[in-house]
């Protein structure tokens, strides 16, 4: 039986991964809901939350995106005593008040310090497991990238729960050409361990004038928990809430323990096994589509997580009979463990380019005296561009050097479609 030591915040707990396939409990929101998107994404994420908790439906004919945003802006100004740094002047506390008034619910926003991730995860997941309120939160450390989690799977381990997976809808969506929005449309699932890495302090995309060091904002460098507690447990009423469950985010079992590690072939052949080992063959929404698809050639992505730590994974495209991609699966580059997936609402036309094509596109963007260096396929949540705001949309990164050999910035070329992004790198705090 494989034994893994998981580190979360300031503690490390051993979990017997072999027990994950038995006695799993599934917690879901009180009501099912469909994916909604908006600009800013915080608007749609709260609407999904209100629907999932109390089946709230806006009155017919009401443009709820603009109405809710306007209300949030008003509440945010009132609470802050002036303008907010957040996108379009709408921050989480303002949105909690706006959603509560519009839907006659009792949404609350809690913040936790940089050393309290375990407590933040416990409280947010307990909102779903105990109160059936969707987990509404930003991910990847990005203030402008919100999701609504509607289902978790966990295994009781003594007085705690081993958090196996979290499923959610992405609220990010803007009018774009080339159908890019399709790549954010669908059900996403992360292993407990990867969720704990992607659910991070708000450090980026608060406002371009100060990112990533918007330290004057009250939510900067804080974990956010937003949910709708029962009225008797509402913070606004001053009543105390019931104690949260305790969750230990858990890695899925690896598909190989070979000293040679993973390979493209192992990732391609082992993707279905990885899902089964993770227990996702019990999740029909995820497994049925992926199992009916054919694994394409995986690509190795040398990513960094929101904390800036190395995170390498294989991105495996899953093709339907028509040759379109029905899903992506991420497997750990170390042992092939399931890490995350997205099952698209409609299969997408995926157009990956190779390193040679990416290099030629980057060269075409150089000015006289500039030259390129590098060209690794990477992903980082520190890049705030909608074309790469999810780990299944990685990019080739080329450093741009001047005549003296000094790095002046970077050219990013997206794996899908070869979109070019010129970046002036700024250090993260």
Image (cartoon, rainbow, N blue to C red):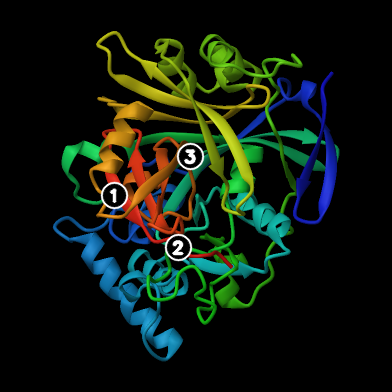
Query: Distance between the Cα atoms at labels 3 and 1?
Result: 23 Å
The N terminus is located in which quarter?
Answer: top right
User: Quick one: label 3 or label 1, which is nearer the N terminus?
Assistant: 1
Query: Distance between the Cα atoms at labels 2 and 3?
Result: 21 Å
Residue under numbered circle 2: 143
Residue under numbered circle 3: 378
Is 46 left, or right, of 281 in this rendering?
left
Residue under numbered circle 1: 173
The C terminus is located in which quarter?
Answer: bottom right
Mark 1 Cα shell of 10 Å, populated few (<14), some (14-19), many (≥20)? many
In the rendering, at what x and y percent does residue 40 appear? 32, 61
Q: Which mark is residue 224?
A: none
Q: Evaluate if marks 3 and 1 touch, with contact meaning CB atoms under 8 Å apart.
A: no
**Vertical placement of residue 255 versus 353, above or below:** above
Mark 2 vs mark 3: in front: 3
Is 12 left, or right, of 357 in this rendering?
right
Residue 4, picture quadrant: top right
Query: Mark 1 falls on what kind of element?
Result: loop
- Residue closest to the eye, 34 or 116: 116
Query: Distance between the Cα atoms at labels 2 and 1?
Result: 14 Å
In the rendering, at what x and y percent does residue 57 appear? 29, 53
Is 325 left, or right, of 130 in this rendering?
left
Q: Is residue 141 visible?
A: yes
Q: Residue at x 24, y 48 (%)?
A: 365
Q: Residue at x 27, y 50 (%)?
A: 366
Mark 3 Cα shell of 10 Å, populated few (<14), some (14-19), many (≥20)? many
**Vertical placement of residue 353 versus 89, above or below:** above
User: Quick one: label 2 or label 1, which is nearer the N terminus?
Assistant: 2
Residue 403, picture quadrant: bottom left
């Amino acid at each position: 039986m494989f034994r893994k030591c998981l580190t979360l915040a300031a503690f490390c707990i051993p979990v017997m991964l072999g027990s994950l396939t038995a006695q799993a409990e599934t917690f879901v929101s009180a009501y099912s809901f469909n994916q909604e998107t908006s600009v800013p994404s915080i608007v749609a994420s709260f609407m999904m939350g209100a629907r999932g908790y109390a089946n709230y439906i806006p009155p017919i004919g009401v443009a709820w995106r603009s109405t809710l945003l306007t209300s949030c802006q008003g509440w945010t100004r009132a609470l802050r005593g002036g303008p907010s740094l957040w996108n379009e002047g709408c921050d989480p506390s303002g949105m909690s008040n706006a959603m509560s008034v519009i839907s006659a619910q009792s949404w609350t926003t809690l913040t936790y310090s940089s050393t309290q991730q375990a407590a933040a995860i416990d409280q947010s997941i307990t909102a779903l497991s105990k109160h059936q309120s969707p987990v509404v939160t930003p991910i990847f450390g990005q203030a402008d990238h919100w999701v609504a989690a509607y289902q978790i799977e966990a295994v009781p381990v003594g007085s705690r729960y081993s958090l196996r997976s979290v499923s959610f809808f992405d609220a990010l969506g803007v009018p774009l050409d080339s159908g890019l929005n399709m790549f954010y449309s669908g059900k996403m699932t992360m292993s407990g361990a990867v969720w704990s890495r992607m659910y991070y302090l708000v450090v980026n995309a608060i406002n371009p004038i100060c990112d990533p060091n918007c330290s004057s904002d009250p939510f900067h460098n804080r974990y956010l928990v937003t949910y709708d507690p029962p009225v008797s447990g509402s913070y606004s009423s001053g009543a105390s809430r019931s104690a949260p469950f305790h969750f230990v985010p858990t890695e899925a079992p690896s598909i190989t323990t070979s000293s040679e590690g993973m390979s493209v072939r192992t990732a391609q052949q082992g993707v279905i096994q990885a899902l089964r080992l993770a227990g996702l063959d019990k999740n029909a929404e995820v497994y049925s589509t992926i199992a009916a698809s054919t694994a394409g050639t995986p690509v190795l992505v040398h990513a960094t997580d929101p904390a800036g730590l190395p995170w390498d994974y294989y991105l495996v495209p899953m093709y339907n009979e028509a040759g379109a991609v029905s899903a992506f699966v991420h497997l750990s580059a170390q042992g092939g463990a399931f890490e995350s997936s997205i099952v698209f609402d409609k299969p997408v036309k995926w157009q990956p380019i190779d390193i040679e094509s990416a290099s030629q596109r980057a060269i075409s963007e150089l000015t006289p005296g500039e030259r390129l260096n590098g060209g690794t396929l990477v992903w980082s949540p520190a890049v705030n561009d909608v074309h790469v705001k999810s780990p299944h949309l990685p990019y080739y990164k080329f450093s741009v050097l001047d005549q003296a050999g000094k790095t002046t910035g970077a050219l990013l070329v997206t794996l899908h479609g070869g979109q070019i992004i010129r970046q002036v790198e700024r250090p993260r705090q």
